[in-house]
């Protein structure tokens, strides 16, 4: 199971990186909503890692410096790999949401959620790119597997 999550995290890293590179090259035509969603994808990943690792979290909708986006994406990946390597996927994590509500979920459930969450929002970013006159990036998992 850990190998499967490693593969999904590599998929997530790869397509987030392509989106960030597109944003950096075309940020003058990206919509504010697209930029917000891109930052939100990275922020949410950081937040879930931080909840597991008991670290400080980003704001859910904070806007990060453009020049930090690739670094944040890489750091998110590395922290998730650290979790995979050092923690039991069945371990239950107790955390508080941004609204202060307390919940318990397994690390496995959290990792699946953060991958699914990123995929969902990358689809929204594709719509924003198309509306801005850009060619959306095909970010389906199968496209990643065909090339890796």
Image (cartoon, rainbow, N blue to C red):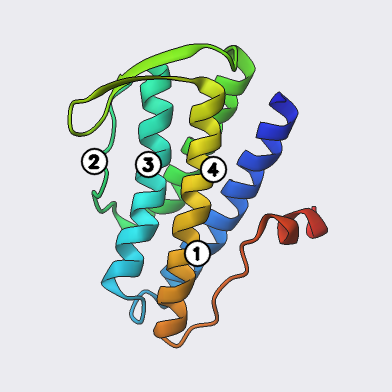
Q: Quadrant of residue 147?
A: bottom right
Q: Position of residue 63 (x, y in %)?
A: 25, 53
C-alpha distance separating marks 2 and 3:
8 Å
Residue where numbered disc 1 is placed: 123
Q: Residue at 73% across / 61% down in the picture?
A: 143
Nearer-N-terminus badge (2/3) = 3
Q: Residue at 42% across / 43% down in the picture?
A: 72
134 lies above or below 125? below
Residue where numbered disc 3 is placed: 44
Q: Quadrant of residue 127?
A: bottom left
Q: Dot 2, crowdedness within 10 Å: few (<14), some or many (≥20)?
A: some
Name the element at disc 1: helix
Q: Choose mark 4 or mark 2, whichever is in front.
A: 4
Q: Residue at 54% across / 56% down in the picture?
A: 17
Q: Check residue 59 in the rendering and tell me which mark sits there, or answer none.
A: 2
C-alpha distance separating marks 1 and 3:
16 Å
Note whether residue 68 is visible.
no
């Amino acid at each position: 199971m850990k190998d499967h999550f490693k593969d999904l995290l590599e998929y997530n890293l790869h397509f987030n990186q392509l989106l960030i590179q597109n944003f950096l090259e075309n940020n003058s035509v990206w919509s504010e909503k697209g930029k917000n969603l891109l930052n939100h994808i990275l922020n949410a990943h950081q937040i879930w890692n931080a909840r597991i690792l008991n670290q400080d979290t980003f704001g859910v909708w904070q806007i990060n410096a453009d020049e930090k986006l690739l670094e944040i994406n890489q750091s998110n990946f590395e922290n998730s790999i650290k979790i995979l390597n050092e923690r039991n996927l069945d371990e239950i994590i107790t955390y508080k949401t941004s609204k202060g509500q307390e919940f318990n979920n397994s690390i496995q459930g959290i990792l699946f959620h953060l991958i699914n969450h990123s995929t969902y929002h990358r689809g929204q970013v594709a719509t924003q790119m198309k509306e801005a006159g850009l060619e959306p990036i095909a970010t389906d998992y199968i496209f990643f597997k065909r090339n890796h």
